[in-house]
Amino acid sequence: MKALILSGGAGTRLRPLTFTNAKQLLPLANKPILFHIIEKLVKAGLRDVGIIVGDTREEVEKTVGNGDRWDVKIRYIHQPAPLGLAHAVKTASGFIGDNDFLMVLGDNVFSMELDALIKNFHSDRANSSLLLHRVDNPSQYGVAVVENAHIKRLVEKPREFISDLIITGVYVFDKSIFEAIDSIPPSPRGELEITDAIQKQLETGGRVTYGIIQGWWKDTGSLRDILEANRLILDEIDCDNKTLPKGDSEITGKILAGKNVVVKNSTIMGPVAIADDTMITNSFIGPYASIGRSARLNDCEVDNCIILENTRIDSIPRRISGSLIGRNVQIVSTRKRPHSNTFLVGDNSEIYL
């Protein structure tokens, strides 16, 4: 069985960060989202991985590499335009060949392992198998109508409530999915929908099975969800032999610390992840903060945040919370009169004072 990761989306809900960063490379607990997904694939025994890429191909290839760090083989497949998930699958047909394959959307993270889904796909002799998840507001997702433990119908972003079971970004397919994709027209938004292709399998007698997400699952396409995913992963971190020396600071809870981290006269309340070469002075950090490489935090309070590399936060009088802060950012109080705020801010930014 092969694996396919879709990593070509534009990440419009996370702009302006995604103007300059692939959303699938944004870090959770200081590790890119794609790394978390690849590690799940490796645990499930999948070592032949294709990654669908778009405009951010160069950045994704540079960061992920050829797969050697996980002992897997990675091939990059360019999707020239974002024409839907089914179009992305069709683009990968040369890589997939006649093999069964597991597909994961590159902005999905989850706690469960994939072994059971793959095992059930084979034992049920399914053409497709989906991971479903129960939510309160299913209108923004593909939705599955299930009766008597069987999928009866699939609808992409239904206008009316038909089910609270949504299709997550985890699928297993056999080669019949390509024939189904060739049999569907583009949706009203001009895309080939994978939901429509699986529905076509149902209509033509295909066997479509499902599993229910065990544990947690997050689509990290929005600020709220990526921060929630960061919190969930930080709760699960293994910090054996990775705690910081306390010195003149108070450090409690789980701390995932990189190399050459300096903490002076500060309180760190875990769970917190701190990357290499970071310096924290006179500050209160945590819980649920991920701080990127070579950051400089002085005289500030930070919790429930993701802060990317080479960012400096200095002398900010109010706590910074619920924030995603990009690379090479400076948030600094000048402490000069007259008191004023000065901003250099890109498109689609949000600032709350």
Image (tube, rainbow, N blue to C red):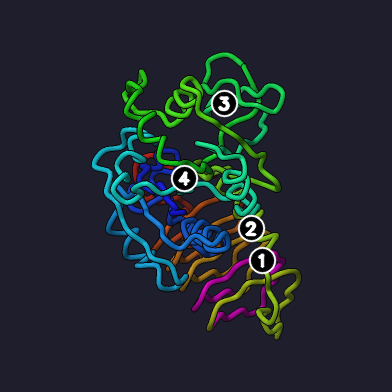
Where is mark 3, residue-wise? 143
Whether residues under marks 2 and 1 lie with C-beta atoms below 8 angstroms apart, the answer is yes
Residue 213 on the magenta span: no
Q: Earlier in the sequence, mark 2 or mark 3?
A: 3
Residue drawn at (32%, 61%), measured in percent from left and top? 61
Q: In this view, does 297 lie above or below 117?
A: below
Where is mark 2, residue-wise? 233
Instruction: Tell me the amino acid under the disc marked 2.
Output: Ile
Q: Residues within 10 Å of mark 1 (few under 14, many from 20)?
A: some
Q: Distance between the residues labelled 2 and 3?
A: 26 Å
Q: Distance between the residues labelled 4 and 2?
A: 18 Å
Residue drawn at (63%, 61%), measured in percent from left and top? 301
Residue 280 on the magenta span: yes
Residue drawn at (44%, 23%), measured in percent from left and top? 200
Highlighted range, magenta = 260-281
Instruction: Tell me the amino acid under the disc marked 1.
Output: Ile
Q: Earlier in the sequence, mark 3 or mark 1?
A: 3
Q: Distance between the residues labelled 4 and 3?
A: 16 Å
Where is mark 1, residue-wise? 237
Whether residues under marks 4 and 2 lie with C-beta atoms below 8 angstroms apart, the answer is no
Report x, y in % for residue 85: 39, 36
- Position of 16 with respect to 38 (left or right) is left
Q: Can residue 314 be seen in this view?
A: no
Q: What label does residue 105 carry, if any?
A: 4
Residue drawn at (71%, 69%), measured in percent from left and top? 254
Report x, y in % for residue 90: 32, 38
Residue furthest to the top in view is 160
